[in-house]
Amino acid sequence: MTWLTPLIGGIAAAIAAPTLIILYFLKLRRRDMEISTTLLWRKAIQDLQANAPFQKLRRNILLLLQLIVLAGVCVALAQPELAGSTLNGDRQVILIDRSGSMTSVDESDGKGGKTSRLEAAKKQAITLIESMRDGGLLASDKADSAMIIAFDSQGETLQSTFTSDKELLKRRVQEITPRDGPTLLDEAMRLAKAQSPQRIVEGRGLIAGEPMAIHIFSDGRIPDAAKATPGQDDHVEFHKLGQGDATNVGIVGIRSERSFEDPTRLSVFVSLQNNQPLERTVDVEFLIDGAGKGIKTANLPAASKTGLGLNKAQEAQAAARAREAAEAAGGKAPDAPATDGTSLQPGLSGVVFQIDRSDGAVVQARLRDPGSGDPPSGDVMSIDDSAWLVVPPARKLAVALVQPGGNLFVSSVLSGLPLSKLVELTPAQFQQRAQAGTLAEFDVVILDRWLPDGAKKSPGGEVPANTPGAPPATTTPVVPGSTPTVAGPTPANAPAAPKEADLPPGRYLILGEVPLRISGQSSGIKLVGEAGASSIVDWRRDHPLLRSVNLDGLNVAKSRKIEVLPGSAATALAWTDTGPILVDSVAGDVHAVVVPFDLAESDWPFNVSFVVFMAQATAYLGDEIDGGALRQVQPGSVLTDRLPAGASDASLKLPGGESQTVGVGTDGRVVFGPLKEVGVYELSWKGTAGATDVKISGGAKRFFVSSLLDSQESDVGALDRVELSNKDVLAQSRAPQAARKQIWPWLLLAGMLVLMVEWFVYNKKVHV
Amino acid sequence: MLPTITPTRPKRMDDLLTSELIAKLDPLDLSSKRVFFGKLKGERRSKKRGQSVEFADHRTYSTGDDIRHIDWNILARLDQIFLKLFLEEEDLSLQLVIDCSASSDCGDPSKFLFMQKAIMALGYVGLVNLNRVSATAMGPGPSSVISSLRDLRGKRRSHDLANWICSLNPGGTYSFREAAERIALSRRGKGLMLVFSDFFFKEGYEQGLRRLVGQGYDVFVIQVLSPQELEPPITGDLRLKDVEDGDLAEVTISAPLLKRYKAMLGAYCDQLRTFCARRDLTLLTVRSDTPIDVMVLDYLRKRGIVK
């Protein structure tokens, strides 16, 4: 029992009760009656009043009833509530997980049926909101307030300020719709903390703002929980949704690959996951543009306990197979659960479809129950039962090789690759083509020991002093985002634009040079100086570029010493003892793989890995290795792409069928999102079509697909604890109960009833 | 208890005494535990020795005695002179006192009407038996007496008595002590006195009764209470107003209060009874709805007032 306004109730009682009693003395409207003598009456009442002044009130049932009414009203004024749940803070932050796993249908709807975890979470959140302390009628400042954040891979504040308007809060909760994306809590937690500015407390310094009660409604499948940091004083409650033994089988990875020899031969790898401790068999349907092209049966091993040593050999085998399958499918290998030993490691399997298809296509893999053809039975989550993939058309790459002089190694390696076109250009020709905008006909441009001058300058405009042959920095730097041809004032006799322009949009393999600026931005690479002889110490074996490349034994006699700026667009892929030696940099519309040393200064060209690297690099840059991963947008992420010049009136058809207009930027960029659901998104526009686009009358269309492909989300078994960075929160043992019940209306009602009884008694007494 | 709303006032003797009642009253006579001196020759034995035929005593002769009373037989036998003494028969003085205050005119049936009928009946008995009947009405007047009748005698005077009784109008308040004093002072001789009242005197009845009894009268106290005073039929929150002095008493009628009232009434009557017993007064408490013949023939006879 809590009292919202005990003081008011007490004051009212203190005033009203004596007043009632005094009024009771005064209020009686007595009937006048003449009698023979008042002698005996006086004696009788004198006797009754003899002991105390309040003798008159003794056994006065009317007064007693009125006092009961008054007590009821005064208690009602104090606004007692039966507390069904305890709320620790005045400020509640309600975090509701709306990720893909929350669409799992394994919560009871209270009517014998099943409902999704998100619906159950909304219900519980509404119950929690209803259980919030009202300020009551008289003390609104004492009310609990709440804000609501829904999160999947991003957090969204649905109610950004703390409010005690329960109806508003409930409406906000009702507005939450499921997203098919993965779960990330950190951002939501930051949003919550942002509402509570830090404050300075004497003796403790700067600490978090006013403590809040943070309620996390989730199934506990939060991969980044360890990053989320609630305030030290905050009280965190985890409301677990879903069942720990919920079963699900889902697709956790899909990718395609065309045969190196015969690009028309398409292989599609589908990686599957089973989280239940029983073996399962599912059919995987394979559809191209909605039409079934094949069906394969996959046997999924049972999810097994890790760390208990049960059937280790089988387990190890399964794990290895799982890893292979996951890697082959390009999906994330499931992280080994670092939690308790009783958690089940999902069983993984995969299937491969092989077809002959040279055209691009949108392929779909779909899980079906063997035999019946229905969705898998006992599956609580449906969004991971389908996965889509955009397969680019089979084609050979067009490659341009730009080098100031001949380089036998590069030329000969490239001539051996199955390319549609290999054109050797001089730097001047490259710049001409760059000016004319005809470089787009090449899928990949290889720059061997040469770079446009603009690319050698750091974005600050200064050429590093130790760069040999760098011209003095006399020109104004290119404004980021502007086209290269509108660079600042230049000497009149110099060819203006090409000199100062950096790399035009495209994919580049840069050998023996280090670009500092690409696409008007920093490349993320910092040139430190020259490095002497060095050898490879490590490389990213899991990167698509280096997947089959063995760099062991590569020696470099002389190189440039570079650093990769942290947080920049560049990623180091291989390291020597002096620093990075292979960098992948994506900035703006330029994707560049940088090899900073001159091949002639190393023994790499004599190594077989060089040939493999060149083949991989051209394929990687030519978008062939990723198997359409660029058109794969995870739910919750933002769809961004660039349309060909002149595109307009873009509209995006969502998986649900409705269309939305998408604005096209001046540079052809379209942005949409974050995507809410899995499926195929069809972007159509008026204007020219790109190489991989489908031409339609007056325009073109391009497909994007969104699939969950997240083994963490697909592993739907709800967890009992959430390990935050500074707190380990166990699930609440029970859902928030119907919570605070306002008693005062009942007290008032009781008061009314007593009043009616009093009326009855009074009438009876008067008329008898 | 409550004032009689439309009081029936007797207008003539027939309203006070019915013929049936007269028939019942005729054989009755008044009696007293004591023997009083009379005033006139009457039909009642007096303390005096006198002329009756009933022998009382002998006494020795002393000079000057009437020789007619000498018992000659004794003189002849003993040679001593004794006088024969005879009992004297005289009349009895009956004093009727009626309370004419406003409180008397309350109740249903009216206490006052009951008292009127009662004194008429008793007065009639007294007159029939050749007693001297006096009547006094206590009420708001000089010395708290409205009017009085003196020394009626003989059956013929019963109409005078009835006329006087019918002329009485109750109302107002008075001092019982004053009235008693006045009666005591104006009284001649000794005799029987019947005081009719409810004895609800705020100043107390003690002084008045003491004054009346002091003269050696044989006083009968007849307390008349209405049925409503015994069982108050009232309820609710009331402001009770005394019909005599206008005194207000605010009461909320409840079962405990009624119980308390009855207890107080019982105690008051007991107190009166005790007071009367101590002073050799005879108390009779009657309800105003008691038939007169029952009261006279039963109650009064049992108490020795009539025989």
Image (spheres, grey):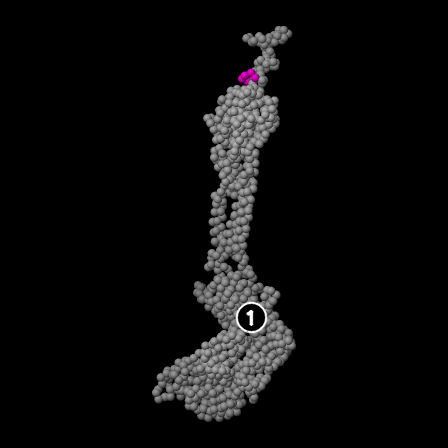
Q: Measured along the vertical axis of the image, is residue A416 above or below residue A329?
A: below
Q: Position of residue B22 (x, y in %)?
A: 59, 24
Residue A365's image quarter? Answer: bottom right
The chain letter under disc 1 is: A
Closest to the observer, A407 or A756: A756
Q: Residue at x 57, y 77 (%)?
A: A386
Residue at 49% in and 57% down:
A136
Q: Is residue B279 magenta?
A: no
Is residue A237 placed above or below A313 in the rendered structure? above
Q: Main secondary structure of the magenta part?
A: loop
Give the residue number, with chain letter if any, for mark 1.
A102
For badge 1, the amino acid type reads Met
Q: Nearer the viewer, residue A465 or B168?
A: B168
Q: Which residue is the extreme one toward the left?
A: A492
Residue A183: x percent and y percent?
53, 72
Q: Is residue A99 visible?
A: yes
* Residue drawn at point x = 44 percent, y = 85 percent: A504
Stretch of the chain drawn in magenta: B38-42
Q: Residue A339: which quarter of the image?
A: bottom right
Q: Where is residue B61? Give x, y as percent.
A: 58, 9
Badge 1: few (under 14), some or many (20 or more) residues near its Cα, within 10 Å? many
Corner quadrant of residue A768: top right
Q: Considering depth in this image, is A683 or A494 the residue closer to the camera?
A: A683
Q: What secondary structure is found at the residue carrying circle 1?
A: helix
Q: Which quadrant does the N terminus of chain A fall into?
A: bottom right
Taking A453 as reference, is A188 left or right?
right
